Amino acid sequence: MRQSSARSGSLWEEIFFINSNIACLELNYRLRFSRYEISIL
């Protein structure tokens, strides 16, 4: 269990971490989708 009040800005770090993970997943999905499209063509 983490204490969110231990550091100031921990909320922003969590938001940034989540956003970077989403961006990474989106990039990975786009790369896979483009490869799939290329294999269809």
Image (tube, grey):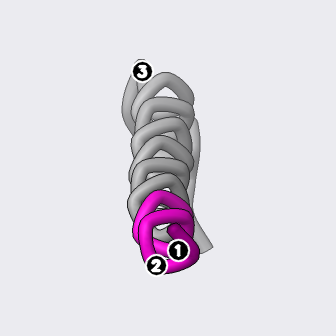
Residue at 41% over, 41% down: 20
At 42% from the left and 20% from the top, the residue drawn is 9
Q: Amino acid at mark 3?
A: Gly
In the rendered view, tell whether residue 36 sits above or below residue 33. below
Q: Nearer the viewer, residue 2 or 32?
A: 32
- Name the residue nearer the viewer: 6 or 31: 31
Residue 24 vs residue 12, the one in the foreground: 24
On screen, residue 6 above or below 35: above
- Count of numbered marks: 3
Give coordinates of residue 7: x percent, y percent: 38, 32
Is the Cβ of the residue at disc 1 closer than 8 Å to that at disc 2?
yes
Quadrant showing the N terminus? bottom right
- Asked if residue 34 is among those painted magenta in the image, a careful observer would answer yes
Tag 1: residue type? Answer: Tyr
Does residue 40 show up magenta in the picture?
A: yes
Per the picture, the main secondary structure of the magenta-coloured stretch is: helix
Residue, x 46% and y 79% (percent of image)?
A: 39
Nearest to viewer (mark 1 / mark 2) = 2
Residue receiving disc 2? 39
Q: Residues within 10 Å of mark 1 (few under 14, many from 20)?
A: few
Q: Is residue 18 above or below residue 40?
A: above
What label does residue 36 carry, if any? 1
Q: Which residues are magenta?
A: 33-41
Mark 3 — residue? 9
